[in-house]
């Protein structure tokens, strides 16, 4: 489908504290809905072993990120953790819109609010809520991707992030994964007016 095949591009933003399940849910939706494409963010954080540049993130130095910032290349950006920047590039939104696809974002709570402000009703923001703070902490520990220090930073930020819940269009509790994935599919097909 080319970009004229869609009356208007819609965007889906999945947001939550680290470890709540955004990546798991977004990956599932990308497999399920051919109409969607993932907004690959730029970041200054170090690449994890299983990650690929250009697929998971555009990994870049702080200098490169700052240059792009000065040249107004970002739709939104946040210093999600101290010294670690994450942002959505304008070129990424254009790349996906040119393909005629709707965009799915996996971004932090503040970035999600910015995307909603930038695109208004074309965006549905979905907050992924863990069943409890303790379970959220445990999932992040079990994922085994963070150093001791990074874990501490992420856990200390979780409480603030959980307080953002009321700012989003939908709240999806991620307790039993199978149920969550079905609900996520339903949210997407309703928003995009699809019959899946
Ligand atoms: P995020 O992208 O929000 O940081 P992930 O998708 O990486 O979160 O999920 C964090 C960890 O929790 C991963 O190891 C993932 O496999 C696991 N996980 C996700 N959803 C569930 C669930 N409903 N029940 C149990 N474990 C889950
Ligand atoms: P991680 O380091 O675990 O991949 O991501 C850390 C946090 O940064 C997550 O909450 C993730 O959603 C968020 N994030 C990823 N990309 C972006 C982005 O482009 N902008 C914003 N604001 N946050 C992002």
Image (cartoon, grey):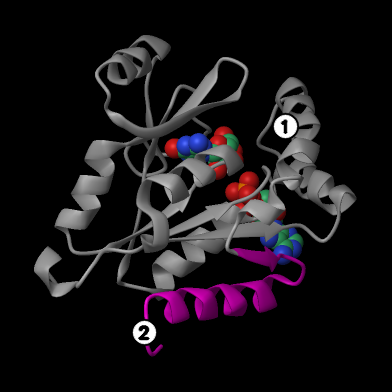
Q: How many neighbours does mark 2 have within 10 angstroms: few (below 14), some (14-19), or many (20 or more)? A: few
Nearer to us in this view, 116 or 63 = 116
Gap in Å between the C-alphas at discs 1 and 2?
A: 36 Å
Query: Can you give x and y, in whole percent of width and height, for residue 89 in the image?
Result: 31, 35
Give whichever of discs 1 and 2 has the lower sequence position.
Answer: 1
Report which quarter residue 38 is drawn in: bottom left
The reply to whether the magenta stretch includes residue 165 is no
Whether the residue carrying mark 1 lies under 8 Å from ligand 2 is answered with yes
Bounds of the magenta segment: 170-196
Mark 2 falls on what kind of element?
loop
For residue 161, side relative to residue 67 (left or right): right
Query: Can you give x and y, in whole percent of width and height, for residue 87 in the image?
Result: 42, 32
166 over 173 or under it: above or below: above
Report which quarter residue 128 is drawn in: bottom right
45 over 7 or under it: above or below: above
> Residue 17's mark?
none
**Residue in the image at 31% along x and 72% along y:** 34
Mark 1 falls on what kind of element?
helix
Dot 1 corresponds to which residue? 154
Query: Can you give x and y, in whole percent of width and height, for residue 132 in the image?
Result: 86, 55
> Residue 194's mark?
2
For residue 128, side relative to residue 136 (left or right): left
Nearer to us in this view, 178 or 192 = 192
Nearer to us in this view, 11 or 184 = 11
Q: Quadrant of the C terminus?
A: bottom left
């Amino acid at each position: 489908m080319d970009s004229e095949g869609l009356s208007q591009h819609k965007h889906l933003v999945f947001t939550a504290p680290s470890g709540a399940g955004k990546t798991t849910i977004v990956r599932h939706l990308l497999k399920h809905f051919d109409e969607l494409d993932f907004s690959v963010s730029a970041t200054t954080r170090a690449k994890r072993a299983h990650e690929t540049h250009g697929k998971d993130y555009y990994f870049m130095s702080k200098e490169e990120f700052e240059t792009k910032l000065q040249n107004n290349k970002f739709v939104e950006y946040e210093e999600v953790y101290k010294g670690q920047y994450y942002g959505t590039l304008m070129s990424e939104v254009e790349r996906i819109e040119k393909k005629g696809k709707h965009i799915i974002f996996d971004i932090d709570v503040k970035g999600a609010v910015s995307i909603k402000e930038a695109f208004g009703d074309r965006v549905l923001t979905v907050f992924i809520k863990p069943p409890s703070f303790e379970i959220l902490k445990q999932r992040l520990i079990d994922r085994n991707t963070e150093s001791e220090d990074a874990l501490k930073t992420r856990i200390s930020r979780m409480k603030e992030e959980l307080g953002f819940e009321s700012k989003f269009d939908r709240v999806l509790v991620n307790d039993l994964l199978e149920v969550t994935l079905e609900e996520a599919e339903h949210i997407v097909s309703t928003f995009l007016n699809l019959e899946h």
